[in-house]
Image (tube, rainbow, N blue to C red):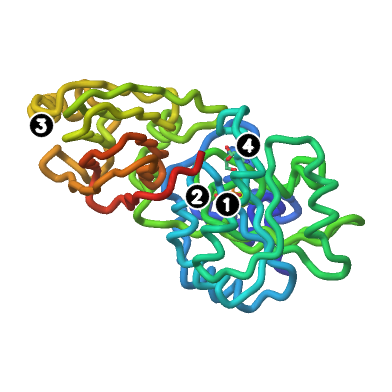
Amino acid sequence: MERKCMGCGVQLQTGNEDDIGYVVDLNMNYCQRCFRMIHYDRHRENDFLPDNDLIMRQLDRLEGNFVWIIDIFDLDSSLNSILVEFYQHHSCDIILNKCDLLPAKINFEKLAEYVLERIKKLKIRSKAIITRGVNNDFIEVFNRYIKVDDTPVIMTGLANVGKSTIINHLLQDRVVTVNRYPVTTININEIKTEDYHIIDTVGIVIENSMQMYLSNKQLKTVVPLKQIRPIVYQLMENQTLSIGGLARIDVLKNQRANVVVYVSNLLNIRRGKAENADKLWENNYGTELKPTLNGCDSFADMKKHSFVNIGKNDYFISGLGFITVNCERADIAIYTAPQIYVNMRKAMI
Ligand SMILES: Nc1nc2c(ncn2[C@@H]2O[C@H](COP(=O)(O)OP(=O)(O)OP(=O)(O)O)[C@@H](O)[C@H]2O)c(=O)[nH]1
Ligand SMILES: [Mg+2]
């Protein structure tokens, strides 16, 4: 009989040690890959790349109560993914996850309203939004709003948003495998207990997110695991902020601008004059300005995104974070690798 790994859902096999699903003995509950992640926090880079079309076909065939888990810190990546189209045709509940990454003082009710407004504009029929990471009553709220007896709850979302973490939280046990690197769960994984019938699914991978172009070591610096301390700048005319070697924001033709950077605090941010910025990047890309993205070999390879800022807006950079600019008027230029999704949105906080 076919046996699946309890941690990631992969079919177990004893034939090839280098392939996914390997176990020494088919009676084991966890594959070698999960065992290494759980016990040694070891993860081989790019050992499995999911096929988004296949995942969507799998989701289409499932019956149950769909839950869309969104990493609040990376909101626009979720709202720019193929899951939008899926949820325009399937009803779902939404869980805003990783809210603990944002400053504790923010109004979470307003944040939920903000997301609801964005979702409504995308014509998504969402039944409820609950936040997590800010309160201890998650299980109670989940049971009240989302759990439906006799129907499986199907956890979906982009890779790394915390689907499996939420499942373990509900089960109050370490049942499924959780890891800081994207693509941990690699097959549909059904879990039945006395209290829950849950299906863990494979995360959708998006090619316009920075997380796809960083090594495991770099991901440790770029993906925040704990609360972010926003960095505040008062920028006078024609100044620039460089975020490692990953992105640069120029604030131009402004009088004075209040700029707040929400990115991992392990990244270096450098402030300078816009007139010197190109030279700085040409000369220091990959040395002083690091980390850099795989495949983006020099500053010349970067793409410039231009915006006009009036009032308070966020500049979202997929997989990195966002920068809030508040001023009467400014020209904004964002430089990053060409494949990375960048957008301007109404300020979230
Ligand atoms: N700060 C914070 N981190 C979280 C939260 N939920 C999950 N994480 C972290 O996010 C990372 C990914 O979590 P997973 O549960 O493996 O995410 P997933 O969506 O199942 O990922 P894939 O299986 O790769 O699609 C882990 O490092 C978790 O510890 C949360 O609410 N807050
Ligand atoms: Mg998972």
Q: In screen coordinates, is 209 left or right of 62?
A: left
Q: Which residue is mark 2?
A: 75
| Image location (x, y in percent) of residue 337 | 24, 46
| Image location (x, y in percent) of residue 73 | 51, 41
46 above or below 230? below
Label 3 secondary element: helix
- Quote the CA–CA distance across marks 3 and 4: 38 Å
Q: Which mark is first along the chain, 4 or 3?
A: 4
From the viewer's side, name the closer residue of 144 and 37: 144
Label 4 secondary element: loop
| Image location (x, y in percent) of residue 121 | 50, 65
Q: Are marks 3 and 1 in contact (CB under 8 Å)?
A: no
Q: Residue at x 88, y 66 (%)?
A: 149
Q: Which residue is mark 4?
A: 107
Q: Which residue is mark 3?
A: 278
Q: In screen coordinates, is 283 left or right of 57?
A: left
Q: How many marks?
A: 4
Three-letter amino acid code at the position of disc 4: Asn
Q: Residue at x 66, y 72 (%)?
A: 91
Q: Which one is closest to the eye, mark 2 or mark 4? A: 4
Q: Does residue 32 show up?
A: no
Three-letter amino acid code at the position of disc 3: Asp
Label 1 secondary element: strand
Q: Are marks 1 and 2 in contact (CB under 8 Å)?
A: yes
Kindly indicate the quadrant of the structure image that contains residue 331: top left
Give the number of the disc on residue 70: 1
Q: Residue at x 44, y 24 (%)?
A: 265
Q: Which mark is first along the chain, 2 or 3?
A: 2
